Amino acid sequence: MAAMEICHLFISTGHNFVGHHGREPDTHPMIETFEIECVAGRGISGDRYFDFKDDYKGQITFFSLEVFDELCSALQIPGCSPSVARRNVITRGVDLNDLIGQEFEVQGVRFFGMEECRPCYWMDGAFAPGAGEFLKGRGGLRAKILTNGRLRSTLSKAKSVSHVAVASPFARERAG
């Protein structure tokens, strides 16, 4: 496997879309952090999916910065943050679909790639109309955490990023 660069790390304390079918999404922010603690079989400490379900297939999620950049270019979305995708680890340098069904290691932490993070209809509202279709087959990777450890961003500084503040014009309208 090519070296995976970790460009951004995000956690959120609450679900904006899970359990919200038929009503407005919630507004829990994605918080960008320099480091996350991965706990084997449980998830990311402090994240909404920590101990979500026994043996959950999405204990951690990955998303490609290259795909994000292509999406923003194709849909002409200026000034958007990868936090809008609501994935935990934003990567560069690896095709995440190649990791489906595979064990892999990043910064000393072992993972098992379970399946694609299939985009849902919420993506059109979070990014822009057409985002869900654009992301089919490249919506990211859901994985299980096999060993305890910490992942660190390659960025020198991380900051808090609010999903509502950086999302699509639709989210800005909802926010106020």
Image (tube, rainbow, N blue to C red):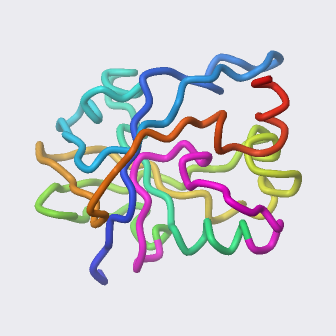
Relative to 75, say whether 112 is above or below: above
**Percent from the top left, x then y, of residue 112?**
30, 54
| Res 23 → quadrant | top right
**Percent from the top left, x then y, of residue 25?**
71, 23
Relative to 19, say whether 138 is above or below: below
**Percent from the top left, x then y, of residue 106?**
22, 64
Quadrant (top left/top right/bottom left/bottom right) for the C terminus: top right
Q: What residue is at 69 percent from the left and 43 percent from the top?
A: 167
Q: Magenta span has 91?
A: yes
Q: What residue is at 44 percent from the left and 59 percent from the top?
A: 90
Q: What residue is at 80 percent from the left and 73 percent from the top?
A: 74
In this rendering, position of residue 151 left or right of residue 170: left
Q: Magenta span has 169?
A: no
Stretch in magenta: 73-95
Q: What residue is at 61 percent from the left and 25 percent from the top?
A: 16
| Res 5 → quadrant | bottom left
| Res 138 → quadrant | bottom right
In this rendering, position of residue 166 left or right of residue 144: right
* Residue, far right: 129
**Percent from the top left, x then y, of residue 130?**
86, 57
What count of labels does the image hold? 0
Quadrant (top left/top right/bottom left/bottom right) for the N terminus: bottom left
Query: Considering depth in this image, is 114 or 92 the residue closer to the camera?
Result: 92
Relative to 169, say whether 132 is above or below: below
